[in-house]
Amino acid sequence: MKPSKYGPFDFSGIDERPPLKWPNGAKVALWVVPNIEVFHLDTALPGDNQNRPVGSEKTPMVREWAQRDFGNRVGVWRVMRVLEKHGIRATVALNSDICEHMPSIVHAAGKLGWEFMGHGRTNTHRVNEIPPEEERAMIKTTFDTIERTSGMRPVGWLGPGLQETWNTLDYLLENGCEYVADWVNDDQPYMMNVDGKPLVSLPYSFEINDSAFFWRHKQSVPEWERMVKDALEVLLEEGEISGRVLCISLHPFIIGQAHRIGGLDRCLEHILSHEGVWAATGTEIMQAWLAATGMTDGVLPPEMR
């Protein structure tokens, strides 16, 4: 997309839109997104506050790296059991290097019916931290590798660190991407106009995100549970008029710790005890929104052209 002072979409206040109706009269679409990531031991990593390396760190950063590796060796399997218990099919933000080095995780998630969206090759580097000429190839490799390992080509994308360049959306469209989750500015999906091409933005969460909450803000499990429940209460009330999305973004090396996994279990039990909650994958939410808004033909509406 071309550089601009606002995003590749029109401004739209949520109370100014036609009411959004979810399938079966649901008020809230619950979207659970585990981030399954891999980091390089020979490259400096973010610290406990998740700030990026500043160049003075020395490798190997054993403790920082091992904490993250815990998520793939232990944490993700706990998350799988909890989500299966509650009948939730997650949408994985997947580093494609997981397919190369830890394919058993991908196969296990596939057996649970989880959806995969691209999340770069690794979280060691973000798209705005690699040479510009490498970004297009990296994105293609991510989609190709996930398709080869899982048998399904992703149609969604979450950038590592939710970062993009001016070229990212164009490269995503080249690879068949249909929705992106980097733009955390809404509680409903909306349509992007990427130089005349449609791309749906889905409401990911930087607030109800275990990484931001536990690592950056150093909050407790009971406080996280309270926050999720409070968010649900508001969204259910607003959803009486127009449907909302509640995205719970997870990192297995954080939420998969033995002292935190119970919080996830209790939150999901509470959420699903309410009528009007629809647990869905990213693709299901996108398709339902397109159908509800009459934009299923893959063409931008006239007012956006």
Image (cartoon, grey):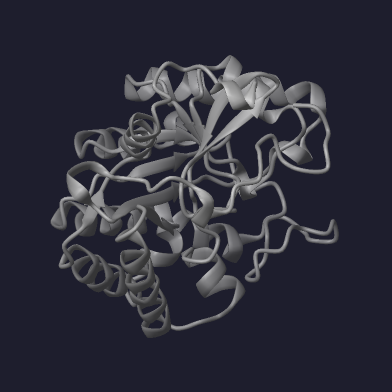
Q: Quadrant of the N terminus?
A: top right
Q: Horizontal placement of 253 versus 61: left or right?
A: left
Q: Horizontal placement of 41 versus 250: left or right?
A: right
Residue 290 appears in the figure: yes
Q: How many labels does the image show?
A: 0
- Determine the residue positioned at 32% across, 41% down: 281
Residue 139 appears in the figure: no
- 162, 271: nearer the viewer: 271
Image spot of residue 180 (x, y percent): 53, 36
- 158, 150: nearer the viewer: 158
As displayed, is residue 283 above or below residue 223? above
As displayed, is residue 281 above or below residue 256? above
As displayed, is residue 207 above or below residue 200? below
Image spot of residue 60 (x, y percent): 68, 55
As displayed, is residue 16 above or below residue 299? below
Image spot of residue 57 (x, y percent): 79, 61
- 160, 18: nearer the viewer: 18
Image spot of residue 169 (x, y percent): 65, 28
Q: Horizontal placement of 156 versus 57: left or right?
A: left
- Determine the residue positioned at 23% across, 73% down: 266
Q: Quadrant of the C terminus?
A: top right
The quadrant in which residue 228 appears is bottom left
The quadrant in which residue 65 appears is bottom right
